[in-house]
Amino acid sequence: MRYALQRFTQFLIVFFLVTFGVMVFMRIGLNKPGDPARTMLGGTVSQELIDSTTAKFHLDSNYFVQYWFWLKGMLTLDFGYSAPNNMAVTTYLKPRVLTTVFLGVYSIFFALVIAVPLAVYQAYKRDRSFDKLSSFATFFFISVPAVVLAPLLKYVFIDWLAWFPRLSSKIYPWDDLVGHFKNFFVPVLVLTIPLAAVWTRLLRADMVQTLQSDFITLASAKGVPPSRVLWGHALRNSVFSLVTSVGFQLGGLVGGALIVEAYFNMKGMGSLLVVAILSSDLFTVQAVSAILVACVVLVNLGVDLSYALIDPRIRHARALS
Amino acid sequence: MSATAELISADILLATKPPRRRRKFPSLGVVFAFIWLISLTVCTLFAAYIPFIRDYDTQIKVNGKTGRYNLGPGWTAWMGTDASSHDVFARSIHGARITLMIGVLATIMGLVLGTILGVLAGYFGGKVDRVVSIIVDCLLALPALLLALLLVYRMDDLKSVYTWLGWLDRKWEITLTLGILATAPLARIVRAQTMGLREREFVLAARSLGAKGGRVILREILPNLVPAMVTVAITGLGILIAAEGALAFLGLGVERPVTWGKMIIDGRADLKRAWWATVFPATFLFLTVVSFNMLGDRLARRFDIREAAI
């Protein structure tokens, strides 16, 4: 419990530091009065508008005051105001968050569905030709950057085979289920492949080690069927790196989503953020990065705490310390 | 007489010698990685003196005219020509120069910063450790690519405000950014390794002889960190190169002369018509990343460093 609290405070500190850092960093160098508002509004705007925006968002006060007001807004789900779009950030963020969440959830799900059985089978048939071949394949796929994979898969599936149509704007499963999956298939594939490869390698390495330990020999010796040994005994003792990696890869996944969204012209959070950064849309950048940081931090916290659930040894070791 | 005695003694000597372990030939992948990286580096460094590599902005004319994608892969231009009828092969080679330079410099920067942070945290523990781990967590909390975008874009702006930042061009901006990105994972691994080394007997021996903290770190701990650092740095180099491609892809790359990411994104619209303008730079990028991963993987197995397998 003490451990959990300690982790929690550390993650809270990280969240505040990073969001504050992003805010300050977006504003450094805008020293002249009215500068932040002018950058935010973009183009040529009247002095009155600049003044009113500055006053409205306290853009002339010091960073701590601004941060305080921003934080207060965040707590009431008011993420600020996007000047280039002349809209509250919250209203136009919602559908975009959904797109990215679909991308992320699908790719994590499919990656796990591919990785876990593959790794278990590889470890079971260690050093056979299937294992060697698929190990080589996973190594290959780990190294494919999203920048390379996206054009390749687009060329194969969309341009050449034409199995999947060009991406339309119909994205919700409750509008058109088939269209939804057709839309998401190739982008999700781009994210899934490297992820599945990383996880397969991690899990395989751990499984191979676990399968050599004594309790596995004992289990098989006393007549536990191999499938129980594999999926019950061995898998449970090998998932640590995998669980850690799920937390760790989340940041990378968002980065990949950034590229995928940019390449396939999807309206998600990543592409939104790119546009926001490039047009100095202060509040959008702050809002999106805060959401992302919160996600990463929470997932990592969950991963840390879930160790104790998976492994009683850790639970007891921590209870003693 | 004496000759036979010598022969016999030599025979006995040979027989008593432990059988020499035959050095295993390195795996095919490692050999390929070496060949690819070395030939790429050589081609890149001496591009101006190698006859079959054109200059990156030479336009190839067909029947005296330039045109969009006027040549497919063939004898004249091995990998075809791009939208402004430049040679894709030559541009890929020239693109490697900036990419490799940025990757190597950023890795060196990440190594220096990451080692300092990691060793301090791992050796002294306690408060120092808490502070360092918060810094590292902060760096890892924002998705790497996002942090890179933010840094590069803002550095562009800051340059116009503060004149003393005038020396920063895109190349240095990206190098600095990627260096910062490389710091966090390196610091983590160095910290973990240092914590392990700190408890070892030779460190205790040095300490009991009266060695101060600085000397223990420099003479006892750092040399033992080298294998881990090299392994992670090489694996990281592949990741950084991919990240550089991604940045270029998002429009924040080095504008001139060329980079792989920019070539890939430029050919996007005409993928169907001229696949070669995208596929070949993508292959270059892929093969380079694979090579670094291959070497990193081999080293990680050689030195038994599990953390490197990210």
Image: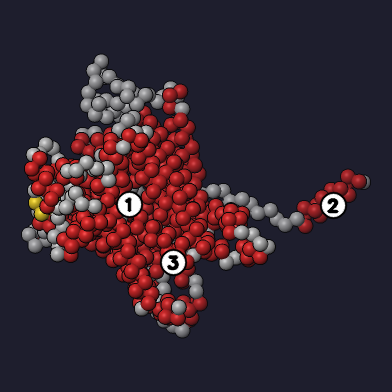
Q: What is the CA distance from the residue labelled 3 to the residue labelled 2?
A: 51 Å
Residue appearing at x 8%, y 44% in the figure: A49
The residue where tag 2 is placed is: B9
Q: Nearer the viewer, residue A55 or A174?
A: A55
The three-letter amino acid code for the residue at tag 1 is Ala
The residue where tag 1 is placed is: B144
Q: Quadrant of residue B160?
A: top left
Relative to residue A57, is residue B168 depicted above or below? above
In the rendering, at what x and y percent does residue B106 appear? 42, 44
Q: Is residue A205 left or right of residue A54?
A: right
Q: Secondary structure at mark 2?
A: helix
Residue appearing at x 37%, y 24% in the figure: B54
Residue appearing at x 24%, y 35% in the figure: B266
Q: Which image quarter is the N terminus of chain A in?
A: bottom left
Q: Nearer the viewer, mark 3 or mark 2?
A: 3
Do pointers 1 and 3 mark residues of a single chain?
no
Relative to residue A216, is residue B251 depicted above or below? above
The residue where tag 3 is placed is: A206
In the rendering, at what x and y percent does residue B191 appear? 48, 60
Say if residue A178 shows up in the picture: no
Q: Secondary structure at mark 1?
A: helix
Which residue ends up furthest to the top in the rendered image? Answer: B64
The three-letter amino acid code for the residue at tag 2 is Ser
User: Cβ–Cβ below 8 Å for labels 3 and 2?
Assistant: no
Residue appearing at x 49%, y 65% in the figure: B125
Relative to residue B131, is residue B63 depicted above or below? above
What is the chain letter for disc 1?
B
Relative to residue A229, is residue B196 depicted above or below? above
